[in-house]
Image: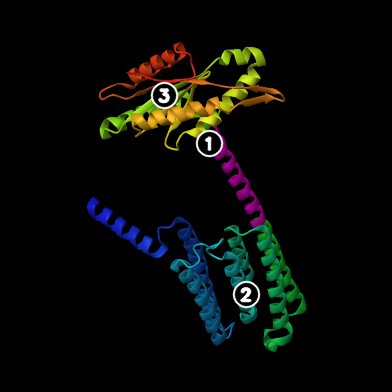
Amino acid sequence: MSPETAATRRSLQQRLLDLLLTTEPRQRTSLVTTGLACLLMVFCILAMKLVAAAGLADARLVHGWALASGACVLVSFALIRSGLTRNWRDPAFTHIQIAYAITSNAAAYVITGHARGIVPPILAVIMMFGVFGLRPVQIKALLGYGLLAFSVAGALVQWWGPPDAAMPGALAAVYLLIVVMVLLTSTALTLRAHAVRERLHGKKRELSLAVEQIRKLATHDELTGLPNRRYMLEVMRIEGLRAGRSGQPLLMAQLDLDFFKAINDTYGHGAGDQVLQCFAHTVSGSVRNTDILARWGGEEFVLLMVDTSAEDGMHLLERMRAMVETTPIQLAPGVIVNLTVSVGAAQLNREETLPLLLQRTDEALYSAKRQGRNSVVWAE
């Protein structure tokens, strides 16, 4: 077989599988589970047909049982495939399918006569389907239902069935004991598997949270929660390339708190940390969602304004400066400090590199400091 023929065959098989099982992951999982139930039912029907062919069971009862049992799993598969159950908590309605399978198994116990020894192993397999997404309370409810269904089935065989179908009391007790053992053991194993799966899911969630925390620590400043210098450098590189391709304006501003060292020296570093947090919160609330504010180091911050004209940038920075000036910070009862910020800003010129843009904003910032602080200075 040539590689092209093999690839064509694999592609055809994949299309057929997608047609049968869909491509939606959750729905596909439900269909696979129900498909396994269909396969189990096929084997059960074949076994029952062989029992009837051997003369151990009424062929008409077996035929009716096979039609009812087979129709149930096929209808379940069609209902899931239609997508009507897609938004259900359990799209495969597993507990309902298992309850019906237990009912079918109990009915088989009644009509198989002296071949009813084939029923308990199948019951064990049915109960193991509870691993697929059932809650512990549902698994225990199915155990109770199974005990009830087989109690009724045993009573039908012993007292209301044909006389030739009844078993000696000791043998009936043995069968009932085996059924109870199968139900209890299968339920215990299913609950154990459920507990293991829940632990694995819990560890997976913990690992995801840990990875997210590590990623955030690597890209964000722990004190203020803002992006850190490393992350900001990467954003600046990407936005610089984008601005170069599109020709859209890109503005950058360096922000530096005025007299921050005096606050640290007077009130302590804890108060300085509180000031930095309040400042970051104030500035974040005065800029747009599209602007990127990062802590550059110490009391220095960098603001990147994407697709922003110089005029809009002037208004935004002046509004931000005024908001910082008019927002006092209470460090302790009766201890209030007023902040001001100096800002150096520049617009990225054509063919200009980001290090040069940073240098120009830095020079503008120092001009703002020399001019008396609490001001916004734009680089030429």
Cα distance, mark 1 to mark 3? 29 Å
Q: Which of marks 1 and 3 is nearer the N terminus?
A: 1
Q: How crowded is mark 1: few (under 14 residues within 10 Å), some or many (20 or more)?
A: few
Tell me where residue 124 appears, x and y as whole percent: 62, 64
Q: Residue furthest right?
A: 169
Left or right position of 185 against 320: right
Q: Name the main secondary structure of what is drawn in magenta.
A: helix
- Mark 3 vs 2: CB contact within 8 A: no
**Residue at which label 2 appears:** 103
Q: Earlier in the sequence, mark 3 or mark 2?
A: 2
Q: Is residue 200 magenta?
A: yes
Is residue 301 placed above or below 200 in the rendered structure? above
Left or right position of 119 against 221: right
Q: How crowded is mark 3: few (under 14 residues within 10 Å), some or many (20 or more)?
A: many
How is the protein colored in the picture?
rainbow
**Helix, strand or loop for disc 3:** strand
Is residue 229 placed above or below 132 in the rendered structure? above
Q: Is residue 196 magenta?
A: yes
| Residue shown at 37% from the left, 64% from the top | 19
The residue range painted magenta reads 190-214
| Residue shown at 62% from the left, 24% from the top | 274
**Residue at which label 3 appears:** 253
Cα distance, mark 2 to mark 1? 47 Å
Tell me where residue 87 appears, x and y as whole percent: 51, 62
Residue type at the position of mark 1: Glu
Is residue 298 placed above or below 18 in the rendered structure? above
Residue type at the position of mark 2: Thr
Tell me where residue 35 appears, x and y as whole percent: 48, 65
**Residue at which label 1 appears:** 212
| Residue shown at 49% from the left, 63% from the top | 86
Look at the image and tell me whether residue 221 can be seen: no
Residue type at the position of mark 3: Ala
